[in-house]
Image (cartoon, rainbow, N blue to C red):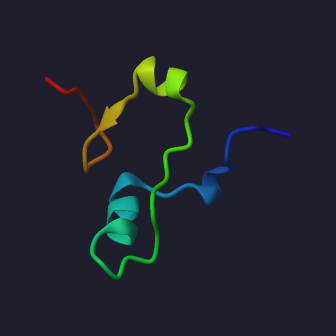
Amino acid sequence: MSLLPRAEDRVSVAEAVRRTRGTDAPAVLLDVRERHEWDAGHPVVDGHGNSGSIA
């Protein structure tokens, strides 16, 4: 048993944006990390799935 989701359970960044954009979006993204996990840093991914950064 893996704690990581299976590939078929994942969506691309573009699909996540499509599903969560607008007032009638069928999905909501919910960050459930603990505070210490958030404080440790988090990756920034642009709309194309590329790594980025915040300046």
How many numbered badges does the structure rendering display? 0
Q: Nearer the viewer, residue 26 or 33?
A: 33
| Residue found at x 37% / y 29% | 43
Residue sitting at 37 percent across and 53 percent down?
13
Residue 14 x %, y %: 33, 59
- On screen, 9 above or below 24? above
In the image, is 40 to the left or to the right of 4?
left
User: 54 above or below 48?
Assistant: above
Image quadrant in which the N terminus is located = top right
Q: Residue furthest left?
A: 55
Q: Residue pushed farthest front?
A: 35
Residue at (56, 55) in percent of width and height: 10
Q: Looking at the picture, how far across and down is residue 33, in whole percent? A: 55, 35
Q: Is residue 53 rendered to the left or right of residue 41? A: left
For image coordinates 27% across by 74% down, the residue present is 22
Of residues 54 and 33, the one nearer the viewer is 33
* Residue 16 lies in quadrant: bottom left
Side of 10 where 50 appears, left or right = left
Q: Position of residue 23 (x, y in %)?
A: 30, 78
Please state, as top left, top right, bottom left or bottom right, where the C terminus lies in the image: top left
Up the image or down, 29 lies above or below 49; here it is below
Residue 37 location (% of width, % of height): 52, 24
Q: Name which quarter of the figure residue 32 lies in.
A: top right
Quadrant housing residue 19: bottom left
Q: Residue furthest right?
A: 1
- 38 versus 46 height, above or below: above
Q: Residue furthest bottom?
A: 24
